[in-house]
Image (cartoon, grey):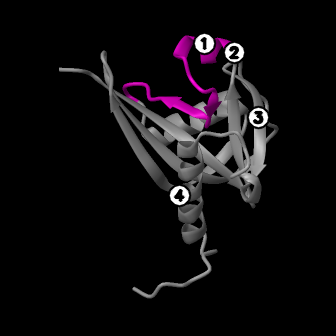
Amino acid sequence: MKPYKIAAKAIIFDQDRVLILRKSAEERNAKDSHGWDFPGGGLEPSEPIMEALAREVMEETGLQVKVVAPAYIYDEIQEEKHLIIIKFACDQPVGELILSSEHESYHWVRLDQLQEGAFPDWMKEEIRRAYRIYTDFRGMGRYVQSL
């Protein structure tokens, strides 16, 4: 049986902008990835998921954020493990943004310019979904739906 690896990622909004990170060249080469990322990472075995998310966001960006709600769950059965990534819509970033060595740059991308960016389609879709959840939870949605 494959072990589970659970990770939490933060899709952080600041008004009409979202935070996207660029992985360092070393990270991109090691993981053969496109290089775009949200802050976050794996849970320690005895660590609650929200604490892990707060810790990882602080380690990778120096920011404190408020978690709004889960926005997206992704899983992938890999050769050595079953990876589960839970992405959370977050807002109210506080602090000075200082990157860890895992990332080489950060981008506060305006949502109305997201489509033109060189980001992968899955990332754009996750941001759109997280933004819908963020606006619903914050009561900012254009339409009030009665129960």
Mark 4–mark 3 Cα distance, whole angstroms, equals 21 Å
Camera-nearest residue between 90 and 117: 117
User: Splitting the image into 4 quarters, where does residue 6 fall?
Assistant: top left
Which residue in the protein does label 2 denote?
A: 25
Residue 23 x %, y %: 67, 24
Residue 112 x %, y %: 74, 60
Is 33 displayed left or right of 3 in the figure? Answer: right
The residue range painted magenta reads 25-46
Q: Do the residues labelled 4 and 2 touch (CB within 8 Å)?
A: no
Q: What residue type is labelled 3?
A: Tyr
Q: Do the residues labelled 2 and 1 touch (CB within 8 Å)?
A: yes
- Numbered circle sitting on residue 106: 3
Element on which disc 4 rests: helix
User: Splitting the image into 4 quarters, where does residue 81 fall?
Assistant: top left
User: Reading the chain from its start, which is encountered first: label 4 or label 3?
Assistant: 3
Count the numbered circles shown. Answer: 4
- Numbered circle sitting on residue 1: none
Camera-nearest residue between 132 and 100: 132
- The C terminus sits in image quarter: bottom left
Q: What residue type is labelled 2?
A: Ala
Is 81 displayed left or right of 138 in the figure? Answer: left
Relative to 80, does residue 61 appear above or below in the rendering?
below
Element on which disc 2 rests: helix
Q: Do the residues labelled 2 and 3 touch (CB within 8 Å)?
A: no
Mark 2–mark 3 Cα distance, whole angstroms, equals 14 Å
Element on which disc 3 rests: strand
